[in-house]
Amino acid sequence: MLLAAGVLGAAPEQLHEATRALDDLQYQVALDKLPAEDTIKQWDRVELTSWFYTRALALLGLKREAEAGQTFRRLFSFAPEWVLPEQYGPRVRTFVSAARAAAVRAGTVSLRFEGGLVRATRDAPGFSRQLELSWREPDGAVQRVALPFAESQPAPWPRDKRVEVWGRVLGLQGSTLYEWGSEPAPLRIEPLQVMTVEVKSTAPSPLLGTLGAVGLAAGAAGLLALGLGTGFAVASQDAQRALAGASRDSAGRITSLTQREAFALDARVSGDAGVATALFVSAGVLAAAGAGLVLFERLRLTPAAGGAVLTVPLDASFAFAGVSP
């Protein structure tokens, strides 16, 4: 079984010998050949992955399943994408899948860029120690900085330029746990679009124009309609109470009012209620139209890079703003 394919570059010779022993199913020899964990220093990600899966598979071959499971979980905490070679059977695959699921649930290391911040998540075993971030500026100059491992911190590269970015999460004495892009294949970060709307606090509010005046008139008419609607609603309720309080005989006929008076009250109940409803609807329409006309008159569209700035100043120091692409 050729488990060490692509791994034998600059890895320590002991690691090469251990992976070859694992290929030959010499599990104890593989464990004996592996360098001790405290000697791992500044290994690349491939070497580190090889060390963990060689140890885990050797332990599993020796039936030391508890130790193998723990080693697999540590491997998947920083390399969840590692795939078991096809030569292994269902029992090993089930064991490895369970270890992968446990590691993913516990948390795996990650590194990403969001909204001007560098965000990172720590692996469950706590291998993560440091961030190494690099970027290439538009003039071709490459910058590199080492940062402490933190869940969120400002990005070190310029935010007003288009830059190419890559980085690593370091642990185990400077060894690479996770790679975020690379110098040959960097991530491209576009400049942040910054929009500012300045409204002078000393400037008086502009006077209303024709549309604004019409809007205010519509709002006033809406208030008037609301008041009239309230009056008709009260009149309808009074007529309803008068009908409800009238004396009736055993057959339910009204005796304290004439037939004409009863019919008049009933007509008032339905008629005044209908007029009140119509006035309430009109008040809502007039108020909405009035507010819309006032805001529309104040709308301003100013050309800007990549689009236009849309503002609706409400007074001398406040404005709604948006961007139109």
Image (spheres, grey):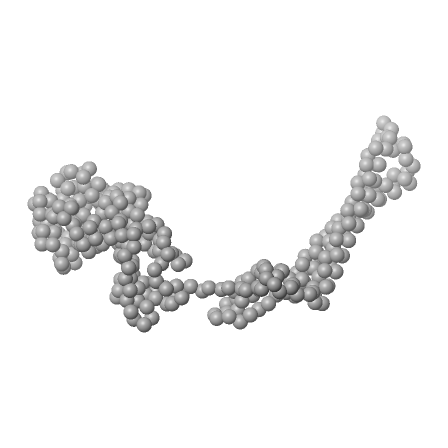
One can see residue 46 in this view: no
Compared to residue 177, the image places residue 211 above or below, namely below
Residue at far front of view: 202
Would you identify the image quadrant in which residue 268 lies?
top right
* Pick the front one: 154 or 323: 154
In the rendered image, which quarter is residue 107 located in?
Answer: top left
| 92 is higher (above) or lower (below) than 296 | above
28 on left or right of 84: left
- 14 vs 254, nearest the viewer: 14
Identified at 32% across, 65% down, the residue is 164
Q: How many marks?
A: 0
Q: Position of residue 257 (x, y in %)?
A: 90, 35
Q: Is residue 54 above or below residue 195?
A: above
Name the residue rendered at 18%, 54% in the picture.
42
Instruction: Evaluate whether residue 34 shows in this view.
Output: yes
The answer to whether residue 62 is left or right of residue 272 is left
Position of 322 compared to 193: left or right?
A: right
Q: Residue at x 22, y 54 (%)?
A: 176
Seen from the viewer's position, the closer of residues 112 and 239 is 112
Horizontal relation, residue 92 to residue 158: left or right: left
When asked about the image quadrant of residue 45, the answer is: bottom left
Q: Between residues 258 and 28, which one lies in front from this camera angle?
A: 28
Residue sitting at x 26%, y 66%: 184
Which x, y percent locates residue 230?
A: 77, 46
Q: Position of residue 124 (x, y in %)?
A: 28, 44
Residue 183: x and y in percent read: 26, 64
